[in-house]
Image (tube, rainbow, N blue to C red):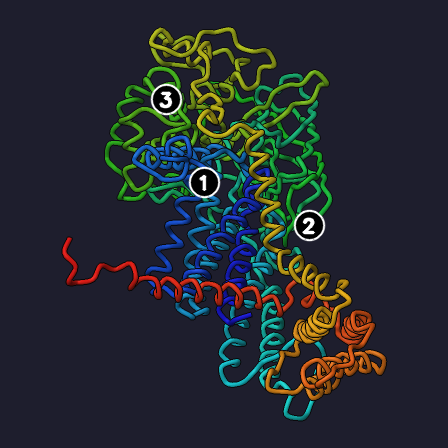
Amino acid sequence: MSGRARLAICAWVATLLASCALLPLVSPATWIVQAAFMLAIQTGVGAATRRVPLARPLTVAAQALVTLLMLTLVFAHAQALAWIVPGPEAFRHFGDLLQQGSDDVSRYAIPAPLHDGIRLMLIGGVLVIGLAVDTLAVTFRSAAPAGLPLLALYSVAAGLSESGYGWLWFLLASSGYLMLLLAEGRDRLAQWGRVFGGAPRTTSGPESSGPLAPVRTGRRIGAVAMAIALLPLPTISGGLLDTAGTGVGAGTGGGGTISAVNPLVSLRDSLNVDENRQVLSLRTSTNDSSDMYLRIVSLDDFDGTTWKPSQRHIEGVPGTFPTPTGLGADIKRSVIQTRISAADWYAQDWLPMPYPPSGVKIDGSWRYEPVGMTVVGDHGQNTRGVTYTVNSLDVQPTAEQLATAPEPSANLRKQYTEVPKSLPAVVADTARTVTAGSTSHYEQAVKLQDYFAVSGGFQYDTQVDVGTGRDAIAKFLKDKQGFCVHFSFAMAAMARTLGIPARVAVGFAPGTPEANGTVSVGLKDAHAWPELYFEGVGWTRFEPTPNRGSVPSYTQSTTPGSDIPDPAGSSAATSAAPSAAPSTSASCTAQMQKLEGCASQAPAIVAGDDSNGPSWLVEVVLISLGVLLLLALLFSPLLWRTRMRSVRLGAHGRGEAEAAIHTLAVWEEVTDTAWDFGISPDDSLTPRKAAARIVRLGQLDPPSAASVHRVADAVEQVLYAPRPQLAAGLAKDARRVIVGFRDTADRSAELRALVAPRSTVRVVWALSAWWTSVTTRAAALRPNLRKPSDQQG
């Protein structure tokens, strides 16, 4: 096999191994078979054009053209000319599929369904990366830079994947790249001398393969480097509501610090999933679960652009949690016990708990953050499949207690009312306008809540961009469309401008009661809400988001013309029965929205449109044919070699001519067998010397060595004797030689000789000779077809 052919195969394998990192992202993973087959065709086209040879740019152009034709045949054949030639309609269809794929990526949780849009993104991306790797490593003979597209492919997959087998994908991708580098190094060494592999070799003499030493050294260095790289390999964690899983904290449990990530993207993704997968199942001692919010973490650091958690000190989980900050003895409260079970796929670092918790019983390595009263996993601990019990307080302040709450301490007020100077003035101006005439911070808070949920004309829409930059809140106040992140962030920021300590909590809204008495909490229950601080009561929940969660009983509206909300009211998500109310329209008033008499405006589930694609039966047939063709390509050397051996060692005629041809065929089989095991033929040697060379390098046992010499003697008789004495039993001798090579070779050499025999290069030689003869005959015929210059037409 030539050096470039070996490099091309290694480039194909390296791209395929790096593509395996994409497998956890979608389900089912059948796309990888189609991608492997199309990638093999792309690689084969490159090998063929380099064999011609074509100029390097033409080689790349030919591969790109074939790639486009394959993608057209698979994804846009209905819009193409003759099913394969793309036109304007086909390119428009490609654009539609890519847009559909982009929408599906943002809509579905991992693993996403294998719709046509996502499939085009996966297969098209792998083919583009494969073309880049083949161009760099094979066409331009520079394997090292080919690692960059492989790294890009792996990095994108690893950054999105929630799989716990990141080390495996890294190992596969790095193995492919290392194999590519070693193949290039072997090819470069071969230019300085022959490099043979396969069967064991003698360590001295003119036939010893010196360049093998650096090649084997390179393998060992690469293996050690990968082993070292796997030891500290970091895990890329998800967001607060994604499957994270690295754990935080330092030391053995006595302390450390914790900092969390921004939850905006993961929260929005959870709300927009089509399948509302169950995250938590809980059973609680309270009869009313409409206020059962499960809080994960609080965001108290506001920089004008977004909210995020502050870096906090953590400590061991106490047996009984201290009284929440600011909660006075005169506030009515009751203790609730809740048993929570997390899904076995939900790997969250922070422990979802009702607020404020007073104690938790859970196995594993967990730490306590006292300021936010949160529990967080330490050193990889997460919620995957855990069951735990939380005791929490149901704090029931009255409106009067909140309205007469004294000012908080100066330190707390300074920390939780701080807003940056970059905050647009419209935020504070709107807050003052909405709360005009209020006599207390409590009344201001209720008016802000009513402004967003009732009287302000805001609409709940999870498809609205989260928004970035210092004008994000101002834009939300102007457009009046958003989801819980917008409502909670805006209300907390406006509360701070009024001097009310505020932060944002992230977690889950009340789930759906089940018939067996449990409550099911799904991905779509992911929620964010503001918490405002009142001295004597502590951190108090408000609900400004329309049609989400439940309105706290203590937020009695003071807005003129507004009715007091029903404290037992909850979102449609908390009701076990389907809503019979009409969908939201112009007839749905703001007060009806507050009382949740309107249907949710969350986007409906949109099934993938497969009308333009082939039916599932055609897909199965095409994939099956692709698998069969791929297997045929992979095993074609083995099949050809088996067929040639059968023909050479088969029966022959009784005549002298047939017996002579049979003797030469058996000798060719013996030399090809030696070639398959790494002993290349040397046509400059006589049959006798060639036989001695095969026996010596192959380290054959005495019976096999005798068989080789008998076949060589028969060949010399046929070639040189005036009256050759034809020998019998040569086919049996050849088979004994084959067994001898298999007995002396190691397992890898034997497998190589079986699956990828070196002697199959004779097929390429035969095709090349045929092509040369065709072109020679065509050139010879050309003058006869040309009209003489002096002939009159």
Image quarter of residue 709: bottom right
CA gap, disc 2 and disc 3: 41 Å
Secondary structure found at label 1: helix
- Which three-letter amino acid code belongs to the residue tagged 1? Leu
Decide if residue 604 is in sight here: yes
- Front position in the image: 212 or 359: 212
User: Image point 55% across, 42% down: which residue?
Assistant: 31
User: Image point 44% across, 59% down: which residue?
Assistant: 46
User: Image point 73% across, 44% down: which residue?
Assistant: 363
Ranked by sequence position, the earlier of labels 1 and 3 is: 1
Instruction: Kindly identify which residue carries mark 3.
Output: 452
> In x, y percent, where is residue 495?
36, 31
Quick check: 657 left or right of 107?
Answer: right
Quick check: 171 left or right of 47?
Answer: right
> In x, y percent, where is residue 737?
78, 74
- Which three-letter amino acid code belongs to the residue tagged 3? Phe
- Which three-letter amino acid code belongs to the residue tagged 2? Ser
- Front position in the image: 750 or 356: 750
Instruction: Kindly identify which residue carries mark 1.
Output: 120
CA gap, disc 2 and disc 1: 43 Å
